[in-house]
C-alpha cells in the first residue's frame, strides 16, 4: 500500500511538473522569447556588415531642407534620371506608394512617369489593404494588375490560411502604364513584443500570389519566372534558393537576418542623400563636377525611399526592429534582398527540436539533482545553463534561432520541482526511519536524539530516576513446550499491550531483555512524580496481564504471570559505547537493585515488589506488606522491600 502511495505521489508530481512546464512554455513563448530573440539577433546574429553591392538613396532631412517639401514628382524623377542616364545600376527598387495624381502639377507627373517608363530595370512597390474598398471595377483591376505584374507561383502547401487582404491600393493609370515590375511592400509590423522580425515574402488576394518588392527584385536579377510555396519554404525554381518560411493570414513570411548598423546612421546599408543625386544631375548637365560620381552606382542594386524626421514636415517610414526602435523601412527592404542574394537566411528551430531540448534539459537536471549533493548539483546545473547559453550564441551566430529563455526557465522549474520532491521524499524517508527506529528504540529516546541530532556524543548525566523491571514467570519451561512461532505470538501480544501503559505514565522502555522489560521514569521525560507514576504503571500492567490470561486460556494458550520490581535513586543516564556505536541507557546501582528486587518475586511468590526509596514516595497511595531485612546480592547490609497489594488509582501525572 505504501509503495502504491509512493508511486502515486511520484506520478502526480511528474504530471504537475509537466503541466507547470507547459504553462511556462506558453507564457515564455509569448512574452520572453520574442525579447530574447531581439537581443540575440542584435548581439550575435547581426555581427557582420551588409555588403556594398546593395545601397540606399534616401530622401532625408538634408533633402527636404534643401528642396522644400512637398516635392513635385519631377523632383523624384531627377533621382531616377541620374541613376538611369549616368549611374547605370543593375537594378533599382522604389520603396514608395504612388496611388494618386498631383492634380495641381500634371506636367510634373508626366515628366516623372516618362522617366520611369524608360527604365527597364525598375521594380516599384505596391500595397494591399485589409479594408474592404472593393468597387465594381475591382475585379477588372485585379485581373489587369496580375496580368502585368504577376509571376508564376505554385502553391503546394497542405496547411493554407485565407488571406486577410481585401483590395488593392490602386496605381493611377499613367503610373500603371509607366512601370514594368512591381512587388508588395506590405509588412506585418508587429510581433508579440511589437518588433518587425520577419518579411512578408508573398502576399495573396483573390487567389492570386505576389512576391515582395525584395523577392521580385531577386527574381529579376536571376531571370527567375517561377516560385513554389511549401508549408515550410519558398522555392525559387531557377536558382534553387529555398527560403525558410511559414504561413499566416498575412501571407508567406520568413525571418530577417539583420546586419550591423553603420556608424552615425540608422542604416545597415550604405546610404546616399537624394539631394546629392539631384545636385549631381544638375552639375553634370552644366558641365560641372558632380557631388557623387555616377560610377559609384555602376552595377549596384539601389533602393530609393524616404525617411526625414528632423525637418518641420516629417516624411517618416520607420519600423521597430531588433536593431533599432526606429529602423528606416527602406533599409529593411534592402536587408531582405541582401538576405536573398547572399542566401543569408535566418532559420528557426522547429517545435519538435525545441521540445526535445526542453525534455533533455529537464531529464538531465533531474538526474543531476538525484545523483549529486546540493552544492555540487547547483554548480553543475549552473554550468549546464551557461553551456546551453553558449550553444544558443553559436546558433544565432550561424543564423539559426533557438529558444533561449524557455529551456532555461524549464530547467529552473525542474530544479525547484526536483529539490522540492527530494525534500518531501527525504522527509517521508526520515519519518519512515523514525517510525522504524521507534520499534527498536523508545520513541522518547528517539525524539531526544532527533532533537539533539547535531550534538550526539558519548557521555551523560546523573539523574534521579525510577527503574522498573518486569519479567515473565516460567518463561523458560513454557518456551520448551511451545514452538518458537507460538512463543513469539504471546510475547508480541504481551509487549504490545504493556508498551502503551508505560508510555501513558511517562515511562520510557529502555530495552527488552528476552522476556523481560526495563523501563525508566524521570528521564528522558522529565517528571517530578516519576516514582508514583512508575508504581501506578506497574499496577495497571498487572491488571492488563490478568485480562490477557483470561484471553489466552480461552484460546488454549498457557497462562503466564509476571513479576515486577521497582527502585528509585540516582543513576547515570546518557550515551555509552564508542564513537561509531552508541546506546542510550541507564546504568548504576539503582538499576541493578531494581533488577534484583524483581528477582525476589520468585522467592516470596509475589508479583510486585518495590524498594524502600520508592515506597517513601508512594506510601500515601499504596497498601503494602513489608518484607524486612532481605539480603540483596551485592549489598553488604540487609534492607527492607515492600510487596504492593493495591493502590488508590488516580489520574496519571501529566507530561
Image: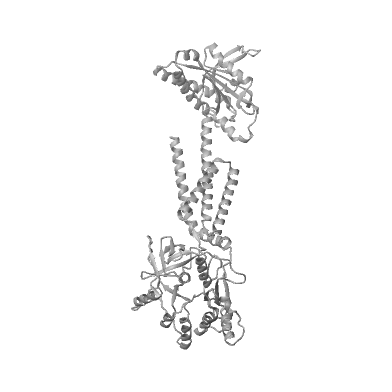
Camera-side residue of 373 and 163: 163
> Which colouring convention does the figure follow?
one colour
Q: Position of residue 65 (x, y in %)?
A: 58, 82
Q: In which quarter of the image is the C terminus?
A: top right
Q: In this rendered view, identify the residue nearer to me: 583 or 524.
A: 583
Q: Where does residue 119 sit, x and y in percent of width and height?
A: 48, 79
Residue 164 visible (yes or no)? no
Number of marks in the image?
0
Q: Residue visible at 58% across and 82% down?
A: 280
Tell me where residue 621 appears, x and y as whole percent: 54, 23
Q: In which quarter of the image is residue 174?
A: bottom left
Residue 578 visible in the shown view: yes
In the picture as drawn, the residue positioned furthest to the left comes out as: 136
| Quarter of the figure with residue 442 | top right
Q: Would residue 622 appear left or right of 173 to someone viewing this image?
A: right
Q: Where residue 631 sits: x, y (%)?
A: 61, 11
Which quadrant is the N terminus positioned in?
top left
In the image: residue 647, left or right of residue 165 = right
Can you say whether 200 is above or below 92 in the image?
Answer: above
Q: Does 454 appear above or below 633?
A: below
561 relative to 576 in the view: left or right:
left
- In front: 27, or 638? 27
Amino acid at each position: 500500500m505504501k509503495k502504491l502511495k509512493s508511486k502515486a505521489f511520484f506520478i502526480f508530481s511528474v504530471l504537475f511538473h509537466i503541466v507547470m512546464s507547459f504553462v511556462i512554455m506558453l507564457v515564455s513563448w509569448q512574452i520572453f522569447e520574442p525579447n530574447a530573440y531581439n537581443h540575440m539577433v542584435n548581439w550575435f546574429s547581426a555581427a557582420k556588415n551588409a555588403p556594398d553591392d546593395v545601397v540606399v538613396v534616401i530622401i532625408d532631412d538634408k533633402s527636404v531642407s534643401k528642396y522644400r517639401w512637398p516635392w513635385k514628382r519631377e523632383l523624384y524623377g531627377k533621382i531616377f534620371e541620374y541613376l538611369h542616364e549616368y549611374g547605370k545600376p543593375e537594378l533599382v527598387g522604389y520603396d514608395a506608394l504612388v496611388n494618386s495624381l498631383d492634380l495641381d502639377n500634371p506636367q510634373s507627373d508626366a515628366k516623372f512617369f516618362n522617366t520611369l517608363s524608360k527604365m527597364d530595370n525598375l521594380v516599384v512597390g505596391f500595397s494591399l489593404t485589409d479594408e474592404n474598398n472593393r468597387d465594381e471595377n475591382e475585379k477588372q483591376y485585379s485581373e489587369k494588375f496580375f496580368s502585368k505584374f504577376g509571376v508564376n507561383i505554385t502553391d503546394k502547401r497542405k496547411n493554407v490560411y485565407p488571406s486577410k487582404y481585401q483590395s488593392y491600393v490602386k496605381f493611377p493609370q499613367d503610373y500603371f502604364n509607366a512601370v514594368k515590375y512591381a512587388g508588395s511592400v506590405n509588412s506585418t509590423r508587429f510581433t508579440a513584443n511589437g518588433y518587425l522580425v520577419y518579411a512578408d515574402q508573398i502576399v495573396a488576394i483573390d487567389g492570386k500570389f505576389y512576391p515582395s518588392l525584395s523577392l521580385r527584385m531577386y527574381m529579376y536579377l536571376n531571370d527567375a519566372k517561377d516560385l513554389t510555396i511549401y508549408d515550410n519554404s519558398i522555392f525559387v525554381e531557377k536558382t534553387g534558393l529555398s527560403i525558410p518560411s511559414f504561413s499566416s493570414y498575412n501571407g508567406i513570411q520568413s525571418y530577417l537576418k539583420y546586419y550591423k548598423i553603420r556608424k552615425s546612421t540608422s542604416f545597415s546599408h550604405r546610404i546616399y542623400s537624394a539631394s546629392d543625386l539631384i545636385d549631381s544631375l544638375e552639375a553634370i548637365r552644366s558641365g560641372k563636377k558632380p557631388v557623387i560620381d555616377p560610377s559609384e552606382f555602376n552595377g549596384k542594386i539601389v533602393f530609393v525611399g524616404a525617411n526625414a524626421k528632423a525637418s518641420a514636415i516629417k516624411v517618416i517610414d520607420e519600423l521597430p526592429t531588433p536593431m533599432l526602435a526606429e529602423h528606416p523601412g527602406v533599409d529593411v527592404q534592402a536587408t531582405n534582398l541582401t538576405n536573398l542574394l547572399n542566401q543569408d537566411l535566418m532559420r528557426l528551430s522547429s517545435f519538435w527540436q525545441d521540445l526535445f531540448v526542453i525534455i533533455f534539459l529537464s531529464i538531465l537536471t533531474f538526474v543531476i539533482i538525484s545523483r549529486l549533493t546540493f552544492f555540487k548539483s547547483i554548480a553543475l546545473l549552473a554550468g549546464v545553463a551557461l553551456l546551453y547559453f553558449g550553444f544558443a550564441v553559436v546558433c544565432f551566430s550561424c543564423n539559426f534561432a533557438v529558444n533561449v529563455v524557455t529551456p532555461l526557465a524549464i530547467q529552473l522549474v525542474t530544479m525547484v520541482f526536483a529539490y522540492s520532491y527530494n525534500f518531501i521524499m527525504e522527509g517521508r524517508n526520515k519519518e519512515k526511519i523514525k517510525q522504524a527506529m521507534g520499534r527498536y528504540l523508545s520513541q522518547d529516546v528517539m525524539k531526544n536524539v532527533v532533537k539533539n541530532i547535531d550534538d550526539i556524543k558519548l557521555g551523560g548525566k546523573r539523574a534521579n530516576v525510577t527503574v522498573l523491571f518486569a519479567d515473565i514467570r516460567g518463561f523458560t519451561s513454557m518456551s520448551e513446550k511451545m514452538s518458537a512461532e507460538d512463543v513469539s505470538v504471546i510475547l508480541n501480544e504481551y509487549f504490545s499491550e504493556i508498551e502503551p501503559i508505560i508510555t501513558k505514565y511517562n515511562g520510557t522502555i529502555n530495552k527488552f531483555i528476552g522476556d523481560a522489560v526495563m523501563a525508566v521514569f524521570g528521564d528522558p521525560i522529565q517528571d517530578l512524580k516519576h516514582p508514583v507514576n512508575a508504581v501506578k504503571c506497574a499496577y495497571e500492567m498487572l491488571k492488563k496481564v490478568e485480562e490477557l490470561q483470561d484471553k489466552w486460556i480461552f484460546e488454549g494458550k498457557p497462562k503466564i504471570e509476571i513479576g515486577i520490581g521497582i527502585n528509585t535513586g540516582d543513576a547515570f543516564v546518557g550515551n555509552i559505547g564508542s564513537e561509531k556505536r552508541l546506546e542510550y541507557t541507564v546504568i548504576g546501582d539503582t538499576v541493578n537493585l531494581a533488577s534484583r528486587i524483581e528477582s525476589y518475586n520468585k522467592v516470596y511468590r509475589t508479583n510486585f515488589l518495590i524498594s524502600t526509596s520508592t515506597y517513601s514516595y508512594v506510601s500515601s497511595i499504596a497498601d503494602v506488606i513489608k518484607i524486612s531485612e532481605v539480603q540483596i546480592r551485592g549489598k553488604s547490609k540487609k534492607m527492607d522491600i515492600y510487596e504492593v497489594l493495591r493502590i488508590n488509582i488516580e489520574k496519571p501525572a501529566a507530561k
